[in-house]
Amino acid sequence: MDIHEYQSKELLSRFGIPIPRGGLAYSPEQAAYRAREIGGERWVVKAQVHSGGRGKAGGVALCHTENEVYETADKLFGARLVTEQTGGTGKVVYRVYIEGAVSIAKELYLGLVLDRTAERIMVVASQSGGMEINEISRTRPDSIIRSVIEPAVGMPVFQAREIAFQLGVPLALINETVEVISGCYQAFEQLDATMVEINPLVVTEEGSLFALDAKMTFDDNALFRRPDVAELRDKSQEDPRETRAADRGLSYVGLDGTIGCIVNGGGLAMATMDMIKLSGGSAANFLDIGGGASPERMAKAFRLVVSDQNVAAVLINVFAGINRCDWVAEGLVQAIRRDPVGVPIVVRLAGAYVDEGRRIISQSGLPIIHASTLAEAATRVVKAAQSANVANDVSRLIKP
C-alpha cells in the first residue's frame, strides 16, 4: 500500500526526521490560507498523487505570493497528472500540500528497501538526489551507496555514521544525518514498511537538514496490525479493479491486455500469463483465487475479471490440490447464470475432483470452451479473443 507525501512526512517526523512546515489543502482558498498560516515569502505547492516525477509533470510549483498559491492550486485541483510512473491515464489531483520553501545547498538521496535477493533491508543512498536520481542509477550505478542491515543487530550507530560520511554532508551535520538514517530504519521496521524513501534529503544554505520529499510503501499483509497506517489508504489513487479485488480478499493486479485470467496459485498464474504471451495474446490481469476457493469466491473472481471492459476472453486455469475442481465449476456456473457475459470462456481443469468439475460444466449447457492442457487453453483463448475483437471492430464499422 502506498501513501501520500504529506502522510509519509507525518509518519517520519514521529521518528525524528526533520520536515519543513506545511499543510494540506482541499481547495484553492484553503491552499492560500495554508500559505498565510505557514508564513514566509515563498511556498511550494505540491500535487498529492501516488507517483514520482511530479515535478517534471507540472505537479510541483514554487510560488512567491498567496495569490500565486491560489492560482496554482486552482489549476491542479481536478487535473489529471501524467508522469512516467502513472502511464498515459495519469492520476487525478484531489488534494495539494503547501510547504514553506527552503534554500537548498545540496540534494541527497536516502532510501530503505527490502532486498529479496539478500533477504535483508538495504540502505540505498546517493550524493545526488532530486529528479535526476533515476538517471544517475542508470548512468553511474557505481556512485550509489548500498549498505545491508543485519536483522539480528538492526541499524547500529557506526553503520549509520559510515553512510553519513559517504554522503559527504558537512561535519556539523553528521550526527543529525545519523539520526535521520536511524529514524528511517525504525520507521521501516516498526511500521512494517517495504520502502522508505527521502528524495531529496536537502542540506540548506543555513546548515539545516530537511526531508523535502518522502515516500513510503507498506506490506498489505501486515496492515491488520497497523490500523493507524491502514486508515491512510487513498482508494482514489488505486486501480479501481485492484481496489474491488482487495475489498473482496482477492489477489489481483490489473494489466493492459485483453485476456482475463483466473488461476489458483501465484506460480501457475505467472506460467499462464507467459503461455498466453507465447501464444500471441496478452493478459488483462493477474488473479490468484487461492488454494481453498469456495464456489462463492470463484463467482466473485469471475465477476471481477469480466467487469474489465478491455477483456475480450477469459481463461480459467485450475490445478486443484487444496482446492477442488467441482468448487471452481460450481462457482463459474453460478456466476455466468447470474450475470451472463458476452465474451468467450476457456476452462482448463486438472487435479482433485476434476471429473466432477468437468461434468458440472458439460451439463450446465453454457457455451464454455474446454481444454485439457495449458498450452491448448492458451491457444484457444487467444484465438477466441482475436475473433471477439474482430467482431467488435466489424460491428462498430457497420453501426449507423
Image (cartoon, helix red, strand yellow):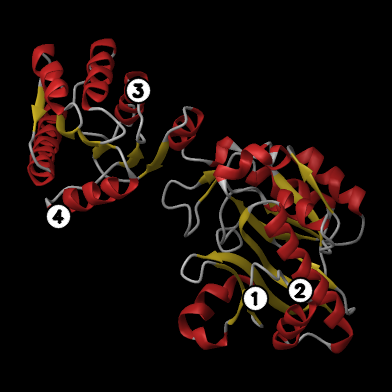
Check disc 4 and give the amino acid type: Leu
* Residue annotated with mark 2: 202
Whether label 1 touches label 4, CB < 8 Å: no
Q: What's the distance in space between the residues labelled 2 and 1, CA to CA?
A: 8 Å
Mark closest to the chain's N terminus, 2 or 1? 1
* Residue annotated with mark 3: 294
Q: What residue is at 68 percent from the left and 59 percent from the top?
A: 188
Mark toward the viewer: 1 or 4: 4
* Residue annotated with mark 4: 278
Q: What's the distance in space between the residues labelled 4 and 2, CA to CA?
A: 47 Å
Q: Quadrant of residue 101?
A: bottom right
Q: Quadrant of residue 357?
A: top left
Element assignment for label 4: helix
Whether label 1 touches label 3, CB < 8 Å: no
Mark closest to the chain's N terminus, 4 or 2? 2
Using the image, tell me which numbered label, if any, was put on residue 286: none
Q: What residue is at 8 percent from the left and 30 percent from the top?
A: 370
Q: What's the distance in space between the residues labelled 4 and 3, CA to CA?
A: 31 Å
The crowd level at tag 2 (other Cα within 10 Å; few <14, some 14-19, many 20+) is many
Q: Position of residue 43 (x, y in %)?
A: 81, 59
Q: What's the distance in space between the residues labelled 1 and 3, CA to CA?
A: 49 Å
Whether label 4 touches label 2, CB < 8 Å: no
Element assignment for label 2: strand
Q: Position of residue 124 (x, y in %)?
A: 61, 74
Element assignment for label 1: loop
